[in-house]
Image: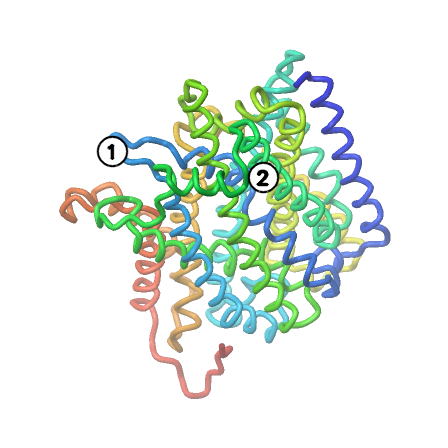
């Protein structure tokens, strides 16, 4: 693809996003920005959440990891990622039946307000801080992939630096989200999810055509290849089923149910019934789309082997290289649309959620005029945009691993305290000594890191994977128990 064609695709795409932003952002106030005035259609949220949940990390890293050979085990990951997805579905059920009813009953805008009601001021601020930390880093890493692709195939052709590419990328997000917030994002995410899903389907079709495979032949070829194994039963393997499945449950709970970004969309539905309906259809779509991504990954490796193509050193580069150099103009265009849509669908809503959380949790928006809210929200939005820029630049300089591994590893350490805080609040009636909570939540990830680094020598060769999140949450839970006492009979706690 020529740089001119790439630029044309990008300009048309963002022109459509800006048009949607203009229409939906008209006369938008703070309530529209934070929760769409609780009037968003559930079916749009369900479809749009696919793009937010998957992001550019899934779009590039999941297909790339399917055939990534591991010398220690002598295996490829194949479809083992599906074990994590099965766990996610259980986690989403818990979110829909336990967490969402609690949030709706308390009429929350920021879900971390629950911690203030249940535990106290410092618990509330600590929970919100860990969300801000985790979501800022995670969303910046997701956006990194989109910026990298745009840089390689467009801006670098004109001698533009990567830092400038990232700056342009973030300015585009800020431009179409600063006014309407979540009200706009409900519609832009639906638009972007369409292109994400279309890109995967078209890529699968194009590769199958290049391999002269019909639909049934393609399914048989993938299922009979070494890339199709789903379940792994070696307890010491990072791909061990129960490691992945249980980690999937808790990753879904913390990265969706305890995450302001995803919950902000659910809380913009008209009522709890519509929010639960949204979650059910999201689960169905989410499972199907992930199977498509894994199928795409297997086909990428099958194609490379059939053509004798050398595999890139970084598995994240496999899909971009083939899509833009091997599969023709149509596949290249839809790859670009897919990576942009998946990355921006995740990052734009994260930017709105980070702004919401900071404004509600740290700036006390409840007691301010609409004019003051609009001014402060404007500067907070800019602040988080700049923070994205810094994180992406640092990540490019230091990172040595797959982006999806980096995102999930970071989530295990930064969401663990949130898991401990919410589970303690919901599962017990004990009252914590609130002023000590920040120390517990900082100490927990440190202890978790020490355990993770020494697991093979301490636990007979056992290596933790993403289930280290559970250890982190458990340490936080135990710490909270140690600084708590039984509740007085006169104290009223928010019930589940």
Residue 244, position as x, y percentages in the image: 35, 51
**Residue 271 in view (yes/no):** yes
Residue named by callout 2:
200
Residue at 63 percent across and 24 percent down: it is 165
Nearer to me, 204 or 17 = 204
User: Which tag, 2 or 1, sits closer to the chain's start?
Assistant: 1
Residue named by callout 1:
74
Q: Residues within 10 Å of mark 1 (few under 14, many from 20)?
A: few
302 displayed left or right of 114: left
Residue 114, position as x, y percentages in the image: 53, 68
Nearer to me, 70 or 451 = 70
The residue most toward the bottom is: 489
Query: Where, quadrant-wise, is the N terminus in this rendering?
Result: top right
Q: Give the spatial CA distance, label 2 vs label 1.
A: 29 Å
Q: Residues within 10 Å of mark 2 (few under 14, many from 20)?
A: many
Residue 49, position as x, y percentages in the image: 61, 53
The relative height of residue 334 versus residue 94 in the rendered view (above or below) is: above
């Amino acid at each position: 693809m020529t740089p001119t064609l790439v630029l044309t695709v990008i300009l048309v795409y963002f022109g459509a996003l800006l048009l949607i932003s203009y229409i939906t952002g008209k006369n938008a106030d703070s309530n529209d920005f934070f929760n769409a005035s609780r009037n968003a259609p559930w079916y749009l949220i369900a479809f749009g959440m696919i793009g937010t949940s998957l992001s550019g990390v899934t779009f590039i890293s999941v297909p790339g990891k399917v055939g990534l050979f591991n010398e220690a085990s002598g295996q490829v990951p194949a479809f083992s990622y599906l074990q994590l997805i099965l766990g996610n579905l259980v986690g989403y059920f818990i979110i829909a039946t336990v967490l969402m009813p609690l949030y709706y009953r308390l009429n929350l805008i920021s879900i971390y307000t629950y911690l203030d009601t249940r535990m106290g001021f410092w618990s509330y601020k600590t929970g919100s801080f860990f969300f801000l930390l985790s979501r800022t880093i995670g969303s910046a890493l997701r956006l990194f992939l989109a910026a990298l692709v745009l840089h390689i195939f467009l801006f670098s052709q004109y001698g533009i630096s990567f830092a400038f590419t990232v700056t342009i990328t973030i300015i585009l997000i800020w431009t179409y989200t600063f006014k309407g917030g979540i009200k706009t994002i409900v519609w832009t995410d639906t638009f972007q999810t369409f292109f994400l899903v279309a890109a995967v389907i078209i890529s699968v079709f194009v590769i199958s055509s290049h391999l002269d495979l019909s639909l049934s032949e393609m399914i048989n070829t993938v299922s009979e290849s070494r890339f199709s194994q789903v379940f792994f039963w070696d307890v010491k393997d990072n791909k061990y089923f129960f490691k992945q499945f249980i980690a999937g449950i808790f990753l879904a709970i913390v990265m969706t149910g305890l995450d302001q970004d995803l919950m902000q969309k659910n809380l913009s539905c008209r009522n709890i019934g519509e929010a639960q309906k949204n979650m059910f259809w999201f689960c169905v779509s989410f499972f199907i789309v992930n199977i498509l991504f894994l199928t795409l990954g297997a086909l990428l490796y099958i194609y490379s082997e059939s053509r004798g193509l050398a595999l890139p050193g970084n598995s994240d580069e496999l899909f971009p290289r083939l899509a833009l150099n091997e599969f023709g103009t149509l596949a290249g265009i839809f790859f670009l649309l897919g990576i942009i849509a998946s990355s921006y669908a995740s990052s734009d809503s994260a930017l709105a959620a980070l702004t919401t959380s900071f404004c509600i949790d740290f700036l006390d928006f409840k007691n301010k005029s609409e004019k003051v809210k609009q001014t402060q929200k404007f500067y907070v939005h800019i602040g988080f945009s700049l923070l994205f820029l810094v994180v992406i630049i640092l990540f490019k300089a230091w990172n040595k691993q797959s982006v999806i591994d980096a995102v999930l590893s970071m989530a295990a350490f930064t969401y663990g305290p949130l898991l401990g805080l919410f589970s303690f609040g919901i599962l017990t009636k004990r009252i914590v000594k609130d002023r000590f909570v920040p120390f517990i939540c900082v100490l927990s990830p440190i202890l978790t890191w020490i355990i993770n680094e020494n697991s093979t020598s301490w636990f007979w060769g056992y290596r933790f994977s993403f289930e280290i999140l559970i250890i982190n949450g458990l340490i936080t839970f135990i710490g909270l128990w140690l600084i708590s006492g039984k509740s007085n009979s006169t104290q009223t706690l928010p019930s589940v």
